[in-house]
Amino acid sequence: MSTLTKILIVLLTLSSIFFCGIVVTYVGNAANYKKAYDERRSTISSLTATNEDFTAQINNLKDQMSNNKITHDSAMEKLQKELDDKGVELENYKRDLKDAAARLENNNAILLDNAKTVEMNNQLRKNAENKIAELEALKTNNLNQIKELTDAIFAKDALIDQHSTEIKRLIEENTRLQNILDGNLQLTSQRIIAPAPVTEPQDFAKITPPMTTLGLEGVITEVKLQDSLASISIGSADGVREQMKFHVIRNNKFVCDLVILNVNADQASGYLELVSDTAPRAGDIVKTNF
């Protein structure tokens, strides 16, 4: 046999052995493949059924999701509308809050002004109360001075009445003595002298010597304008008498008149009359002649 034939035979033998091994292996594994196939098929069927269930469930879930989306969209739309309404309300609240803050600031300013006004009114009331107290004190003082002046005037009136009565008595006595003298002259055959005419009782002021002939001069030492009173530097020792009128002069210009009510030895006082635009003051000259 040739070498090639031997090689072929060897190759054929090896091929037969290999093929037989494959066949044996195939036959041995065929049952296992069928069993695996059946198991796989059963598994696929089960998975297919499961897949169908899952598909049905997914479809149901999709339907639920669609329904839920519609419900959600409706709820969201409703919530958005409510949110928009709340936004409008919030803007209104903000505007109202801003207006309230402005009113509060305005009220605070008004309150501050009212507090200042109350403080000013309290000060004015306090000043008014103090002024009223001063006026009450001044009124009481004026009333006391008026009472004193009234009492002094009553006393002076009584003194004038007394002087008038005394003057009347003296006139009557003078008339009686004149009548007696006339009778005595007739008895002695002397020339007849007509009796002096009987004069009526005269007022005390009329028999007082004219004031303008005295020529008295002094100065004002004190002035009480609120009471229309003044005091001068001369008195009874200088010839000043009650009811005497002095002219108040400043820089050779008439200021007012002063009528004497009360006289002391070295000073006198009285009330002011005919006061001009220039009020009298201490240091002004007073004269009976001007």
Image: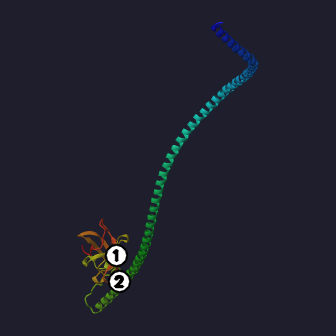
Asked whether, in this view, residue 229 is left or right of residue 101, the answer is left
User: Where does the image place residue 185, in percent across and percent down from the top left?
Assistant: 28, 90
Location of residue 220 by image quarter: bottom left
Residue found at x 62% / y 33%: 79
Nearest the viewer among 256 and 49 is 49
Nearest the viewer among 165 and 171 is 165
Residue found at x 30% / y 90%: 181
Return the residue at label 2: 167
Location of residue 277 by image quarter: bottom left
Furthest residue in direction bottom, as rendered: 188
For the residues labelled 1 and 2, the Cα–Cα distance comes to 26 Å
Return the residue at label 1: 270
Residue found at x 60% / y 32%: 80
Type of amino acid under label 2:
Ile
Q: How is the image coloured?
A: rainbow
Asked whether, in this view, residue 191 is left or right of residue 243, the answer is left
Instruction: Answer whether residue 202 is visible to the viewer in this image.
Output: no
Type of amino acid under label 1:
Gly
User: Where does the image place residue 95, in percent across and percent down from the top left?
Assistant: 52, 41
Foreground mark, 1 or 2, reads: 1
> How many other residues sit within 10 Å of disc 1, few (<14), some (14-19) or many (≥20)?
many
Mark before the other along the chain sequence, 1 or 2: 2
Dots 1, 2 in contact, CB < 8 A: no
Asked whether, in this view, residue 2 is left or right of residue 158, the answer is right
Nearest the viewer among 22 and 142 is 22
User: Where does the image place residue 93, in percent across and percent down from the top left?
Assistant: 55, 41
Label 2 residue SS: helix
Instruction: Answer whether residue 68 is visible to the viewer in this image.
Output: yes
Against 287, residue 94 (above or below) is above
Label 1 residue SS: strand
Residue found at x 72% / y 17%: 25
